[in-house]
Amino acid sequence: DAGVTQSPTHLIKTRGQQVTLRCSPKSGHDTVSWYQQALGQGPQFIFQYYEEEERQRGNFPDRFSGHQFPNYSSELNVNALLLGDSALYLCASSLDLIGESEGYTFGSGTRLTVV
Amino acid sequence: AQKVTQAQTEISVVEKEDVTLDCVYETRDTTYYLFWYKQPPSGELVFLIRRNSFDEQNEISGRYSWNFQKSTSSFNFTITASQVVDSAVYFCALSEAGASGAGSYQLTFGKGTKLSVIP
């Protein structure tokens, strides 16, 4: 049973460019969340998608946007990249069901470097 | 607002020693979940445990044990007889109960504790 897969694993972009990161959730999961993890910090919640709509959003600017597809996979888009956007971007999937025992399953992340 | 504090930034222990990782949380909710995750160098966050706010029983899983104390808002994690494979960054996290299901919560993480187990 495949877990959460993210692509690409590493990416280098120039300031001002746009980037798209991709995530395929664990089989059977219907909810996808994105987190940003700066070096030496804990992950910070960006947003969550369920039924192809953004359901919750953290304290991130509108430059960060996303999408969820009918097969539950998701994309994270970041426009007008800043040096401070350099981080590990983690995707997590979950099952939106009361009583689900584990919560999130995380992918290995995409390491984005903005130069 | 939710907050998680992991005061220990880095810990080094010699193999076979016991080690406790501290976690203190803040929340105004009466219903919430607490988690511990392990992050090896590969970057993936590995789920270790989830606890809801109504279940204060301590839990043991092999060499791992967790001590949840609501009175002190703490959820500490102990590794007994540490091994080199335990070397990683460990994160404590907190979430409110989601309105539409357990999978709807967002996690608030601490800054993590880097554990190094020396052979």
Image (cartoon, grey):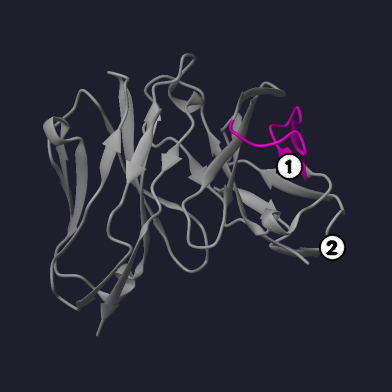
| Residue topped by disc 2 | A14
Magenta stretch: includes residue B75: no
**Same chain check for tags 1 and 2:** yes
Please give the name of the residue rendered at 45% of the width and 20% of the height, measured from the top-left corner: B98
Q: CA distance from mark 1 to mark 2?
A: 17 Å
Report which quarter residue A110 is drawn in. Answer: bottom right
Q: Judging from the image, what secondary structure is the residue with disc 1 in?
A: strand
| Residue topped by disc 1 | A76
**Neighbours of disc 1 within 10 Å: few (<14), some (14-19), many (20+):** many
**Neighbours of disc 2 within 10 Å: few (<14), some (14-19), many (20+):** some
Task: Name the quarter where the C terminus of chain A is drawn.
Answer: bottom right
Please give the name of the residue rendered at 47% of the width and 27% of the height, measured from the top-left corner: B105
- Tell which of B89 and B16 is nearer to you: B89
Q: Residue A23 at x, y = what percent?
A: 68, 45
**Going by the picture, which residue comes out furthest to the top?**
B99
Lower sequence index among marks 1 and 2? 2
Looking at the picture, which amino acid does disc 2 mark? Answer: Thr
Please give the name of the residue rendered at 75% of the width and 35% of the height, measured from the top-left corner: A65
The answer to whether B30 appears left or right of A41 in the picture is left
Q: The disc numbered 2 marks a residue on which chain?
A: A
Q: Does any portion of residue B62 appear in the rendered image?
A: no
Instruction: Magenta stretch: give its range.
Output: A58-77
The answer to whether A20 appears left or right of B27 in the picture is right
Q: Residue A106 at x, y = what percent?
A: 52, 47
Please, is residue B58 above or below residue B84 in the view?
above
Looking at the picture, which amino acid does disc 1 mark? Answer: Leu
